[in-house]
Amino acid sequence: MASTAEQEIDGLEIDPIWTTSRTARQIYVLGEVDKDITRLLALAASSISLLTLPQTDAPGDNLPQGEERSEQFVLEVSEYFERLDSIHVAIRSSLAHIRHSRIAPSAINAPLPGFVPPSLGVGLPSDGSTTRKNRGLQEERVERDSWKNILAALTRIKEVRDQESQGLETLNETKMEE
């Protein structure tokens, strides 16, 4: 049986990437929960504004007056509790999915403060130097290729200068012979 959040996803027009697996659907639902929390906070602020005395309203607030104010409050509070309930269900569904998937808690827990993951997940053996400690294999290859290209460029420059200096020597020798 699909959860309520998954049933809601099936009825919406969403990017197909989010329907490829149950985990992808859960990630999508958590993204929607994030949006719902934002709306929930806006509803709470609006409800509090409706509870204040009309005399304290700013001219640009566009809040209703009289009976309309209490009716608007009831509507917003109703939506607030509906959103709160949907957030509750979505989070519980995600937690159930995590438990069902038997995901290790270490994969969910945040890393320690100051932790820097190795680049690309691959590193070369360290010689103890701290500057190269967090570099990955790709960075090492790029540096190696850069040094090779620098060497090749300097070699070409040296060859051109050697040819120019030989050409100047030949020109000077011909001028001296004349």
Image (cartoon, rainbow, N blue to C red):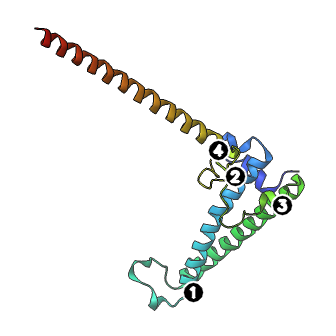
Residue 21's quadrant in the figure? top right
Percent across and percent down for residue 92 are: 81, 64
How packed mark 3 is, by other alpha carbons closer than 10 Å (few <14, some 14-19, many 20 or more), is: few
According to the image, label 4 marks what residue?
136
According to the image, label 1 marks what residue?
51
Q: Is residue 32 above or below residue 54?
A: above
Q: From mark 3 to mark 2, how far is it between C-alphas?
A: 21 Å
Residue type pointed to by label 4: Gly
> Dots 2 and 1: beta carbons under 8 Å?
no
According to the image, label 2 marks what residue?
28
Q: From mark 2 to mark 4, how far is it between C-alphas?
A: 31 Å
Residue 105 — which label?
3
The tag earlier along the polypeptide, 2 or 1, is 2
Q: Indicate the secondary structure of the residue bearing disc 2.
A: helix
The tag earlier along the polypeptide, 3 or 2, is 2
Q: Residue at x 65, y 62 (%)?
A: 34
